[in-house]
Each structure stands twice: as C-alpha cells, then as structure tokens.
Image (tube, rainbow, N blue to C red):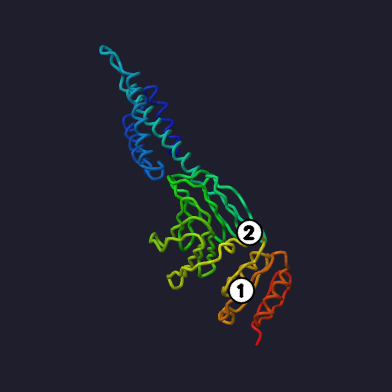
Amino acid sequence: MNDQEKIRDILSRIDTGTCTPQELEWLQSWYDSQELPAEEVFRNDAHRKNIQHNMLQQIHAAMEEHAPAAEHVVPLYRRWWMAAAVVAGLLAAAGWLFTSYNSDRELLLATAGPGQIKEFVLPDSSRVWLNAGATIKYPRAFGAVRAVELEGEAFFDIHPDVKHPFEVHTSEINVQVLGTSFDVKAHSLLDETQVTVKTGMVKVLHQQTGLDVLSANDQLTFSRAAQQYMKSTVNNEQVNEWMNGMLSLSQVGFAELALTLENQYGVKIRFNPAEMKQDEYTLKCSTKLTITQVLDIISSIHPIQYDLHDNEITIHKKY
C-alpha cells in the first residue's frame, strides 16, 4: 500500500472512530515531512503571507463552526477527524498552489527552422522575431520578472512595464530591460555573444555582474574564451537587417559564417578550423540567393574552394 492509499484508509477510519493512535501519529509525521519549500509553492514572500492569512481565516471559521457547546463532550475520534480535515485541506491547497504555480512556470518552446524567420507574441504582449535556427523558451505566464531563455539570434520589441523587468538569458550573458528593442545573438557553438540596441537602453550582465549599459546604436560583444567584452557603435539600420531577408555579417570568423549558412539553408558545412581561423568575413546579400550563389560570392573575395554533395558542403582554403 502506497502513502496515498494509506492516507485515504486512515482518513476513512478516522470518520468511523476505528483509527488507532499509531496511525494518527504516522499521519501527522507524514504531513510534517511533506511540507513544500516556500520557493517552490509561492511566487514571493508577499504571496506566501497572503495565502497563509487566508488559510488561517478558513481554519478559524471551521473551528468556530464545529465548536462544541459547553455541556457537550466531543469524542476523541471526532476531534481527530476535524484535525485531519484541516490537514487534508492544507495539503490540497498546497498541492493546488504547487500545480498552478508550476503550470505557470512551465516553459514553452519556439524554434525557427532553416531559412525561417518566426515572429510571435509573448504573454506580456512583447514581440519576438527568431532568426533561422534560433530557439527561445518562455513561461505560459510571466511573474515578477519576465524572463526568457535564448539560443541563437532574436530581435525583441519589449512591451514597457517598469514593475516587471524583462530579461533574456543566454549561456554566457543576461540582458535586462524595461521597454526597448534590441537584438541578441547567442549561439552556444560560437565564442562570442552579441547584444545590439536599436531603441531604448539595456543592461548586460555576466554571472550576475554588470558589464555595461547600452543605448541605441550600441553593440556589446562578449568573448567566452577571453572572459572580456568590447563595446562599439553600429549603424542603427543594420541592427536587424536579417528580418528583411538579408544575410548581413561584418568581420566575423569563418565558424560564424558557416553556422549562419547552415541555419539559413539547412546544410552541413565541414571545414578545418585551424585552416580557416585567420580570415574575417563580411557578407551582405539576399537570402533569396541559393547556397551555391552565396558560396560563389564568398569565394570571389576570399581564397576558398567548396565541394557540394547533397546537403553537405566541404570547404578548404585555396592556396
């Protein structure tokens, strides 16, 4: 017999007065051991106190309703039934709170496939555009902090709400905003994570340590390998060119170029990192071009050659 079956059995026999003191002690011990941590049940301390206050009022009301007259003696099992009812009520309330709160905390997943730009609206009416290959996780309902998790590149247009700050969490940095529009590029396969602001201001943190505050036209690039960042100024019109069907890269390593092409065209690019690590690549062209047309453009500028077989491309340096 599992715990739930045993509890139901004890509660049913409390009502008939056939429950033993040992079973009542076991029930109390089980209840004491099942108390949920406050951080898993309540949204915050104010929420916890409010629920406790409401519960206390309900318990007092139940006690007054069942209070015996002065000349009436309540049997022991009847008092235990009342106590068990309170225990069951508290457990049911805690269980409901836990289920409800964790339902809100359940993360939804949105992904943009190869060559796709996916636009959608978050629960707070903020708008997000995912670049090809990007993934975002977000809750069904936001709490005090509107937090999302990002892998890949996305552009955010955040609904202003000074009481509920918005945060973008990546593997290396976090971005905190109140109401603004900005781009985050955070590929776990690449060394650098980049934040670029189009309007408003954002704060960038690494492991809860503030790195810098960015405003319109500012770009912050964080290097995982060096554990350092660089701040620069960019053209505001170039912040989210990819949303308008452009492949737009400026002085990036070959690894980022290859990943961008993989996400856009759904291909697999093989190359020798040691062979390709020296050069920086700048590319600006329409995503309407085919992968071979884009590779031809790149090879006309840089000394590379490529072999295409089905969806697999091998690229070497041309000497």
Q: Earlier in the sequence, mark 2 or mark 1?
A: 2
The answer to which image quadrant residue 254 occupies is: bottom right
Classify the position of the N terminus by image quarter.
top left
Residue at x-position 31% and y-position 30% = 21
Crowdedness near tag 1: few (<14), some (14–19) or many (≥20) residues, C-alpha within 10 Å: some
Q: Left of 214 or right of it: where is 114?
A: right
Crowdedness near tag 2: few (<14), some (14–19) or many (≥20) residues, C-alpha within 10 Å: some
Q: Choose between 38 and 159: the one closer to the eye.
A: 159
- Helix, strand or loop under label 2: helix
- Helix, strand or loop under label 1: strand
Pointer 2: what residue?
243
Q: Left of 74 or right of it: where is 303?
A: right
Which amino acid does the dot numbered 1 rest on?
Thr
- The relative height of residue 241 versus residue 78 in the rendered view (above or below) is below
x then y, percent, for residue 274: 56, 81
x then y, percent, for residue 299: 68, 79
Q: Residue furthest left?
A: 70
x then y, percent, for residue 279: 58, 80
Q: Choose between 233 and 194: the one closer to the eye.
A: 233
Could you give the CA–CA distance between mark 2 and mark 1, rounded to whole angstroms?
Answer: 18 Å
Which amino acid does the dot numbered 2 rest on?
Met
Residue at x-position 42% and y-position 63% = 212
Identify the mark at residue 282; answer none if there is no mark: 1
